[in-house]
Image (cartoon, rainbow, N blue to C red):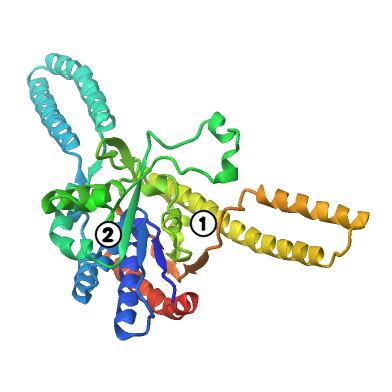
């Protein structure tokens, strides 16, 4: 029986389905229907939360988490940035004073129309400056939202002893925006990058198995673990970047790809289950977006969808090319075995075979290995965002995820047999 890994894409609409799908797989393993547990989980963004519930391998934890999701409120995990709230309070007090002055000017105009009008006109520059300051305060804040409430929630929710002693490994990537990206000189380097594989720049991660993440005093270990987990959830456009040790500028994994399956491949796994589903928010939609926050969320969803498409197609293309390469090598071997004797024509054919073999060794995918994928699909997921979701959407997501998890069991057993 072979080991297998799970890759969990992010986005808020997958939060409830992931929890339920992992719950269904855990339940199937306990009942003996699933041949083995996953050995490794890699996550993107908010998927780190249900993944950590799965590490604890507790039916009670799964049920408690699903109940929490059904009753989830935004204030449990996000709040306005403290600086933004402070600026808003100052602006509110200033506006209140301006309104009081306008009221007094109105009263004055009842007694003396000319003086009242002069007083109101005098308030106009102050009103303009106050409006200008309020707008600047919004755009000069480090971010709109912070995850302080989520940090506190996870600190009391997660069983760290169970996580760090779990037989299931977890790796939670994030992206350092100061270290990722490519220059034209790097892309066109000699030897070319594609010949020996691309070096994935800008990635950082936290695990429950690497010494640098584990060999720490428990209180330090737990706090760093949660902070680094949350750094991978920092949706650009809504949250300020975080820090990993001495690295700054850490943001949501989906900034590069919402499908960091290469982490599982780098750990040696060739059997990978991807819980992707059918997220309607990442496909065409006829939804009307009425405010800039909804437009921003839609733009992020499109970026996630595009990066995911490129990632999936890249791996599938390499799998296809490797399969075709095997066929071509086998044909060359048969051709060479059919040649006997030292005739000139035969030597020419042998030289052709050697040249072909040398050409194959230079292919960009020659050092890759084929990966067995299972892409979990589903009926359409509810179009839920962390800034806009309902209880009914969470319940529907849980039901969809549970169904997906149950349907995956025979496919996984067949893959790892």
Where residue 24 sits, quadrant-wise, is bottom left
Where does label 2 land, which residue?
49
**Earlier along the polypeptide chain: callout 1 or callout 2?**
2
Marks 1/2: CA–CA distance: 28 Å
Reply above or below: 393 against 308. Answer: below
**Residue depicted at 57% across the width and 56% down the height:** 313
Where residue 91 sits, quadrant-wise, is top left
Q: Contact (CB < 8 A) between labels 1 and 2?
A: no
Answer with left or right where residue 332 lies relative to residue 212: right
Q: Secondary structure at mark 1?
A: loop
Q: Nearer the viewer, mark 1 or mark 2?
A: 2
**Label 2 crowd (10 A; few <14 / some 14-19 / many >=20):** many
The answer to whether residue 294 shows anywhere in this view is no
| Pick the front one: 213 or 6 | 213
**Residue depicted at 34% across the width and 40% down the height:** 237
Question: Percent from the top left, x then y, of residue 4?
Answer: 42, 68
Question: Percent from the top left, x then y, of residue 99?
Answer: 13, 29
Question: Percent from the top left, x then y, of residue 321?
Answer: 65, 58
**Residue depicted at 22% across the width and 19% down the height:** 124
Where residue 263 sits, quadrant-wise, is bottom left
| Pick the front one: 119 or 138 | 138
The answer to whether residue 127 shows anywhere in this view is yes
Outermost residue on the front side: it is 342
Q: Quadrant of the N terminus?
A: bottom left
Where does label 1 land, which residue?
284
Reply above or below: 62 against 184. Answer: below
Answer with left or right where residue 267 lies relative to residue 360: left
Question: Percent from the top left, x then y, of residue 202?
Answer: 40, 40
**Residue depicted at 21% across the width and 73% down the height:** 58
Answer with left or right where residue 164 lies relative to residue 342: left
| Pick the front one: 14 or 135 | 14
């Amino acid at each position: 029986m072979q080991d297998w890994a799970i890759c969990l894409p992010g986005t808020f609409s997958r939060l409830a389905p992931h929890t339920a799908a992992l719950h269904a797989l855990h339940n199937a393993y306990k009942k003996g229907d699933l041949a083995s547990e996953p050995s490794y989980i890699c996550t993107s963004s908010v998927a780190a939360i249900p993944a950590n519930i799965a590490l604890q391998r507790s039916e009670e934890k799964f049920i408690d988490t699903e109940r929490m999701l059904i009753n989830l409120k935004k204030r449990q995990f996000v709040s306005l940035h403290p600086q933004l709230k402070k600026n808003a309070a100052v602006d509110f007090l200033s506006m209140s004073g301006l309104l009081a002055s306008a009221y007094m000017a109105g009263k004055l105009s009842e007694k003396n129309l000319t003086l009242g009008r002069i007083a109101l006109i005098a308030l106009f520059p102050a009103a303009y400056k106050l409006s200008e300051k309020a707008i600047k305060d919004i755009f000069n804040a480090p971010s709109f939202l912070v995850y302080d409430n989520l940090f506190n929630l996870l600190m009391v929710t997660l069983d760290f002893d169970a996580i760090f002693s779990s037989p299931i490994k977890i790796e939670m990537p994030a992206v350092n925006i100061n270290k990722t990206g490519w220059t034209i000189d790097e892309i066109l380097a000699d030897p070319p990058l594609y010949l020996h594989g691309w070096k994935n720049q800008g990635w950082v991660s936290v695990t429950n198995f690497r010494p640098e993440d584990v060999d720490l005093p428990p209180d330090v270990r737990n706090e760093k673990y949660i902070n680094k987990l949350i750094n991978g959830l920092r949706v650009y456009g809504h949250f300020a970047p975080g820090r990993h040790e001495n690295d700054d500028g850490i943001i949501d994994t989906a900034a590069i790809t919402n499908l960091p399956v290469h982490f599982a491949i780098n750990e040696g796994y060739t059997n990978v289950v991807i819980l992707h589903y059918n997220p309607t928010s990442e496909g065409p939609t006829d939804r009307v977006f009425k405010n800039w926050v909804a437009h921003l969320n839609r733009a992020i969803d499109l970026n996630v969808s595009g990066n995911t498409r490129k990632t999936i197609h890249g791996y599938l293309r390499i799998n296809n090319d490797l399969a075709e390469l095997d066929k071509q090598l086998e044909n060359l071997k048969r051709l060479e075995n059919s040649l006997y004797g030292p005739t000139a024509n035969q030597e020419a054919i042998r030289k052709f075979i050697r040249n072909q073999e040398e050409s194959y060794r230079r292919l960009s995918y020659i050092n890759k290995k084929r990966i067995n994928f299972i892409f979990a699909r589903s009926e359409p997921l509810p179009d839920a965002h962390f800034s806009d979701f309902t209880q009914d959407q969470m319940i529907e997501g849980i039901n969809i995820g549970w169904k997906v998890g149950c349907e995956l069991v025979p496919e996984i057993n067949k893959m790892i047999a």
